[in-house]
Amino acid sequence: LFSFRSLKLKIKQQTGPFGYRTLGQVVLNSYAHRRDRNPLQACSCVCCTTWMKLIDNNTVPIEAELPLTIVNR
């Protein structure tokens, strides 16, 4: 069995002291990215490789300025 490790982030914008609105989500190393790849090989797209350190090391601060691809849903 293969284990697909991925990271899903919901992107939200604070609209007031108690409110927020959802802007979208980003899925890193998702199955869709890896459709034609060996299951043991991680996704190599720009978005996933930039964020791979968050999957492997969750002590990296999420506030770090990194490129995001936002998918509106």
Image (cartoon, grey):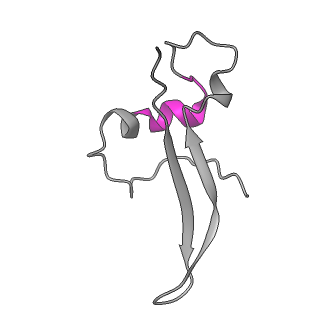
Residue at the image position 53 percent from the left and 85 percent from the top: 19
Q: Residue furthest left?
A: 59
Q: Residue furthest top?
A: 38
The count of marks equals 0
- Residue 12 rendering spot, x and y as whole percentages: 56, 68
Magenta segment includes 48 = yes
Magenta segment includes 38 = no
Res 24 quadrant in image: bottom right
27 shown above or below 63: above
Q: From the viewer's side, name the closer residue of 61 and 22.
A: 22
25 shown above or below 44: below
Q: From the viewer's side, name the closer residue of 16 and 4.
A: 4
Q: Residue furthest bottom?
A: 17
- Residue 50 rendering spot, x and y as whole percentages: 48, 35
Q: Residue furthest front?
A: 1
Query: Horizontal placement of 45 versus 7: left or right?
Result: right
Residue at the image position 39 percent from the left and 53 percent from the top: 64
Residue at the image position 54 percent from the left and 31 percent from the top: 29
The magenta region covers 43-52
Q: Main secondary structure of the magenta part?
A: helix
- Residue 54 rendering spot, x and y as whole percentages: 38, 40
Res 27 quadrant in image: top right
- In the rendered view of the protein, which quadrant contains the C terminus? bottom right
- Residue 30 rendering spot, x and y as whole percentages: 59, 33
Residue at the image position 73 percent from the left and 57 percent from the top: 72
